[in-house]
Image: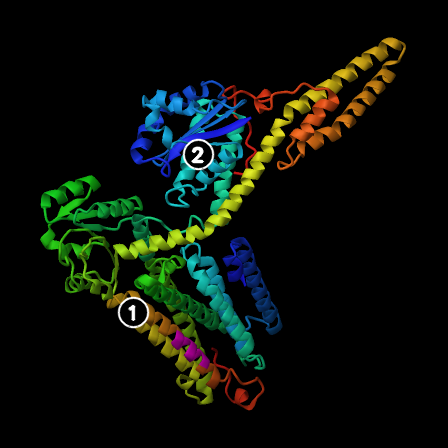
Amino acid sequence: MNIQVTGLNHQTAPVQVREALAFPAARLPDALAALAAAEGVGEAVILSTCNRVEAYTCSADAPPPDLVARFLSAFHGVWPETFQAHLFRHEGREAVRHLFRVACGLDSMVVGEAQVTGQVRAAYEAATAAGTAGRVLHRLFQQALAAAKRVRTETEIGAGRASVGSVAVELAQRIFESLAGKTVLVIGAGEMGASVVASLRAAGAEATLVANRTYARAVELAATWGGRAVSFDALADHLAAADIVISSTDAPHYVLTRARLAEAVAKRRGRSLFLVDIAVPRDIEPAVAEVEGCYLYNIDDLQAVVNETLAQRQQEVGRCEAIVEDECRLFMAWVERLAVAPTIAELAAQLHELKRAELEALLQRAPDLSPEARAEVERMADRLVNKILHQPIRALRDAAPDERPEGLLGAALRLFGLRRAGSHPQGVLPKPGSGEPPRSESRL
Amino acid sequence: MAELVGRRSQPKAARLLLAGALLLHTAFLVVRAVATGGIAVGTRLDSVAFFLWLTAVAFFLAARPYGIQGVARVFWPCLGLGMAAMWAFAGREEGEPAGFGKLWLTLHLVPVYLGYAGFAIAAGAGAAYLVQERLLRRKGAGARWRLLPSLETLQRVEWAALSLGYPVFTVGLVAGVLWAYQRLSPLGDAWYADPKVLGGLVVWLFYTAALHLRLFLRLRGRRAALVTVAGFLFTLLSFGTAHLYGDSGRPEGSEASQARPEAGP
């Protein structure tokens, strides 16, 4: 059996290469069908995200090394020379470990991010729906998702937020019980400010007021967020109504001073005000932080929290890698057991055939045996065959993954004069798409 | 101990330990109740045990609905310290308060202790608010603010505990004052001069002023939390002083106890 992954990601390829080879969700079923139909490929799953395009395949024999490159080139109509240098390829245990690391967020741009686990799940479900995930890839992806779950619950890899926008949301959630119904006042039209507003809105903040020196630009931005444009000159009035202020103008001086804020806070009846100053140079006078009920953060404050989170996650990577290794070992052990299944089936069939032939000969030689005696002889023959089979089958199944079973397998083949069946488990397994997916044995 | 277990990523074991401790505490109160023939609050140990039990039960029941599980990291260790202090310092030698009928126990002591529990939880939430506020303002201190609930949540808990504790405490106090009047006036004593009556009234006046500040002068945030914490410290001081100078510290049968009956907490 040959498990392989071929692809490119944010570490090996620039964004223009990644986007040229990405698979839109609508075209994924066609892509899966095309890849699974390629020479020698039995099962296929394609993981396509903004940071990676990876094709997982499982086949009886090793497919040609450039198979996936040719497939990508043909499917996207791109010359292989434009991306081949960015491709990586792993086989067997390395391919398994790679998928587990990806699913756990250890291979992500922001270590420990949880989004990739959902993307792995979506890729697996797409392949299941397309009928291109057979028993091996079913098991592989289920175990990858189980590994991701273990990593989330047993380590702190997912603790904290790791982007400026999400840290702003988290801080807001430590000031306000809920962001639902909170009013966000956006001052300026900076890109980073827009990203923070998007995060806050995704977390539940509803009303958005937009103030900009150019009123037309404010109207345009307000329309994007379903908010309302307000006059830049009447900021003080709107400060009293807002709960969160995001400022990202390119003004060379302070837009909000302590005196102005103190005036607004007096009208707020003790409600807290969360201010995020993303502008450089700063828009909000630092002394505003001393005003009762005002919580001011600038871009450096938010970035410091992001850095702290990433440093904490980095400390957890070792524990996560240990879990990945553990899950990898379990999966490889399952694969090894799967590889001996055809031999076990053939061995059992051979001995039962031998039993049947011997019984037949015996009964011809002793036609006067009573039905009770015949039944007793048959039962004795069954017990004998089962007892002979018991130990070899157990030894083959229990062969530890590190103790390569080829030794035992070879011995069994020679001792019992068996044919060397294909080591690929598909010899005894349903073909992908041939019916319902096998029952999950994962611990999800 | 539960806090330490919880930190080792064993939240289930921590919850079991807490539930076990609460059950043991309840069993202790039941044993004392059987021994004294009613709710046991006659000795300092009994009264502090009853107060801590009410506080623990109230927090245990309110933590999840109010979303303040984060405060548990501060609450349970503080309660543990309270328990340790109780066993170390609270006297057990006193006799049962003389002449305290079961009706009065119900009407006076239970509401008063429930009120104390409300004030304690409000003070805990207030203290957590002050810590959280400081953490949010200190930018260099890292993201330790993740450990505590939001300022709004803590304010809500503080307000809920105060607004529930205050009226209940008032009922208990009125019952206590009536009882003191009935028992002490015939003996020619000034009921209003009893240290416990005075202490209770001063505490009540303090919380009346605190609620007035919140309701009518819109006192919010850090200052409101400071008032709540100060209120509880004041309550503890008043409670301690009243027990030190009140009659409850004197064993039943002593001269003083015979001359002037017990006046409650």
**Residue at numbered disc 2:** A121
Q: Nearer the viewer, residue A44 or B262?
A: A44
Q: Count of labels shown?
A: 2
**What is the chain identity of the residue bearing mark 2?**
A
Q: Nearer the viewer, residue A320 or B261?
A: A320
Secondary structure predominantly adopted by residues drawn in magenta: helix
Residue beneath the point at 49% across and 62% down: B57
Q: Are marks 1 and 2 on the same chain?
A: no
Q: Amino acid at mark 2?
A: Arg
Residue A308 position in % (x across, y down)? 37, 55
Q: Secondary structure at mark 2?
A: helix
Residue B107 position (above or below residue A421): below
| Residue B5 visible in the current orientation | yes
**What is the chain identity of the residue bearing mark 1?**
B
Q: Amino acid at mark 1?
A: Arg
On whether residue B239 falls in the magenta region, the answer is yes
Q: Which residues are magenta?
A: B233-240
